[in-house]
Amino acid sequence: MKVSVLFSSGKDSSLSALILDRLGYKVELVTVNFGLLDTYKFAEETAEILGFDFRVKKLDSEILEKALEILIKKGYPNDAINYLHRVSVEEVAKEAESEAVADGTRRDDRVPMLKLSEIRSIEDRYNVEYIAPLWGFGHRTIKRFVERFFIVEIDESDKVKKADYEAELRELLRRRGYNVYNYFPKEHMQSRVIGIKH
Amino acid sequence: MKVSVLFSSGKDSSLSALILDRLGYKVELVTVNFGLLDTYKFAEETAEILGFDFRVKKLDSEILEKALEILIKKGYPNDAINYLHRVSVEEVAKEAESEAVADGTRRDDRVPMLKLSEIRSIEDRYNVEYIAPLWGFGHRTIKRFVERFFIVEIDESDKVKKADYEAELRELLRRRGYNVYNYFPKEHMQSRVIGIKH
C-alpha cells in the first residue's frame, strides 16, 4: 500500500517515513510549496539520502495569505501553522490516487496537530487513511530513534535549509514589512536530516 | 532496547508487539493476572505462536477488588477497566529492569486509555518510556494490518479464551453474586490471535 508522507526534511517527518517503510508501506515523500521560496530543493536532497520517492505539491498562495491573516490576528504562529498543516493534509488526501496520508506530528507536540474530529472528517470525506506514526511515542523515545537512524543538522530557524510551513510563512511576513520576531520566537531550533545511519 | 508489552492475546496487543519488533525492539510480552482465572495460559499459547518471550505478572487481588468497587459504583465498566490498565502499566513500569512499557491501545479507543498527564507522570516517576504504537493508526488501518498478519478467532466475551482485564473482573462480579449483564454489554465481540501469516 502506498502512503504519502508530508515531508519537511526534518527529523520527525523523516522518522515517520522510515517507520512506515519498515511496516511494509510504499513511501512517497510530499513537500508542500506555496511558490514563495524554493526550500523544497532541500527536501528533495534529504529524500534522496533517505532513498524514498519524492514530489512537490504546489498549493495556491491564497492559502498562505489566509495563514498570514490568522498569524497577524492571533499574534503568534500556532493557529496559522495548524491551518497550513490541515489544508496540506486535505490537499494530499483529496488526490484521486491517495490511499493513505501521513505526517510527522508527535504525541508531545502542540503544533502542528490535527484534532481527532478533523482527522475523522478527512478520512471520511476523502476515503483515505490518515496515519501519524509518531503519536505513539514520547520525546525521549523519538530522540533515541533519531540518534539511531539519522545524522541531523541543527540550527536556528533562519539558517537551516528546511522545507517546513514556517519558512514560507516567515518569508511572506517579511515581504509585507512585518518584524518576524514579533510573531515567531527568536531562539527556535530547527533540524534537518542530512544523513542516514545503516 | 527491551520493551515489555502488556499482552492479552488479542489482536491489538499482538499488533503492537509486532510493530515494535519491526522497529528493532527486543519484545517481551507481559500478561497481568490477579489469581482468579488462569486465562494467562491462552496468552502464553498466542505468545508462542507470535514467537516472543512471555511472562505472567501476578498482581495483588486487592487491585481487582478496587476495580470491582469502581465498577459497581459507576454501573458501567469504563473507569474500572481504565483503572486496571493504569495500575498494570505502572506495575510493569516500576520494575527495576524496565526500559520501555507498551500496550495495544488505539487512536479510536475510549477504553482502556491513559491520559497524557498519566503517561508523563509514569514516565517521569519510573524513568521509563511508555509506547502506544497503535495511537498513530485509525481503525481501518489497524484492520488492514490485522488481516495482513494474523489469524483471529472472534466470538462473544464469555466464550473467547482471552487474557484481558475484563475476564477476571467479570468473574469476580459473578462470584459476588452480581448479574454480569447489568454491568457489561451482552453482545461484546472479543478477539484472540490464533495464528500468524508469514
Image (cartoon, coloured by chain):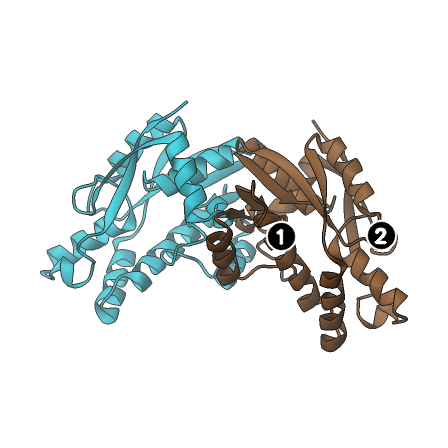
Chain colours: A brown, B cyan
- Nearest to viewer (mark 1 / mark 2): 1
The reply to the same-chain question for discs 1 and 2 is yes
Figure check: A86 above or below B18: below
- Quadrant of the image for the C terminus of chain B? top left
Quadrant hosting residue A77: bottom right
Horizontal side, residue B70 vs residue A66: left or right: left
Q: Position of residue B62 (x, y in %)?
A: 27, 58
Look at 42% across and 54% down and name the residue there: B108
Q: Which numbered dot is residue A37? A: 2
Figure check: A172 above or below B160: below
- Mark 2, other Cα within 10 Å: few <14 / some 14–19 / many ≥20: some
Helix, strand or loop for disc 2: loop
Q: Which numbered dot is residue A91? A: 1
A136 vs B91, nearest the viewer: A136
Residue found at the far left of this picture: B177
Q: Position of residue B168 (x, y in %)?
A: 22, 50
- Mark 1, other Cα within 10 Å: few <14 / some 14–19 / many ≥20: some
Identify the subunit bearing mark 1. A
Q: Position of residue B172 (x, y in %)?
A: 17, 55
Look at 26% across and 45% down and name the residue there: B190
Look at 68% across and 60% down and name the residue there: A84
Identify the subunit bearing mark 2. A
